Amino acid sequence: MPTRTVPLSEVTDRFVAELDQIESAFYKCRGHSTVEGYISYVPTEEGCLFAMWDAWSRFLRTLVVTVSAGPTQSLAGITYTPTSIRTERDVLDYLLANKSGQNYRFVNHEPNWHDERAISDIVTVLSLPNASTIIGSVTTTTVVLGPIVVESPLAEIRTARNFCAHKNWKTFADVGGFGGGTFSTLSDHMRRRRSGVETFSEWKESLEAIAASAAQ
């Protein structure tokens, strides 16, 4: 029985739908209680940030596993067929067996999908037919959002997420290195308006654009 050609739009559509829900939750938690202390923060907003970063990591994982499993059709209509068909388990086992000298590392039996250098090595080790497209997309420094061009948000989101996980004045100052201007809390930073929308929404739109580019 012939193998079904999977549209990569299925992968990107699920990712966009998840980001839409996360953005909606972020809107709804405006004005939620701030925890005062060593460094003030809004737990519900930080939860949305964690969810966004986790969704991005899982999108990259799903994209890699899907392309490894058999024929896929890109958003541009290109059919990709891997030289070696691998199941999800096969992908993880192969990456683990070939991790020496690579930029990815395993934690809890999974590679660090979200890291740009890691995902570049992952798709190269697997010899994915669209490896160059994925690498070009995740390592780009700018993202086109309609009529405007913005900086890729990946480093900024990672830095903000790192502050949430490891609160200290150094990680807080690291966030301040993005976007310009001054702010007193991460909430201020994520709700500052850029390109006509809040920073959190600009991140979301940029992730969608990078995902669409990776699936071309």
Image (cartoon, rainbow, N blue to C red):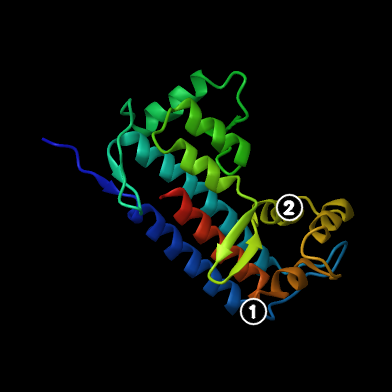
Q: Amino acid at mark 2?
A: Thr
User: Left of 76 or right of it: where is 192?
Assistant: right
Q: Earlier in the sequence, mark 2 or mark 1?
A: 2
> With 83 as the anchor, is 175 left or right in this view?
right
Task: Give how far across and how far down residue 21 sits, in percent.
Answer: 48, 69
Residue occupying the point 54% across, 44% down:
136
- How far separated are the C-alphas under marks 2 and 1? 23 Å
The amino acid pointed to by label 1 is: Gly
Q: Which mark is residue 159?
A: 2
**Where does residue 198 sit, x and y in percent of width and height?**
66, 75
Residue shown at 59%/77% (left/top)? Answer: 27
Report if residue 109 is visible in the image.
Answer: no
Do labels 2 and 1 touch, CB within 8 Å? Answer: no
Which element is circle 1 on?
Answer: loop
Q: Residue 171: image x %, image y %?
A: 82, 52
Depth check, mark 2 against mark 1: the one in front is 1
Residue under label 1: 196
Give the quarter of the figure containing the N terminus. Answer: top left
Is residue 199 in view from this perspective? Answer: yes
Image side of residue 88 versus residue 121, left or right: left
Q: Quadrant of residue 37?
A: bottom right
Residue 215: give its label.
none
Residue 116, compared with residue 161, is above or below; it is above
Among the 4 quarters of the image, the one containing residue 75: bottom left
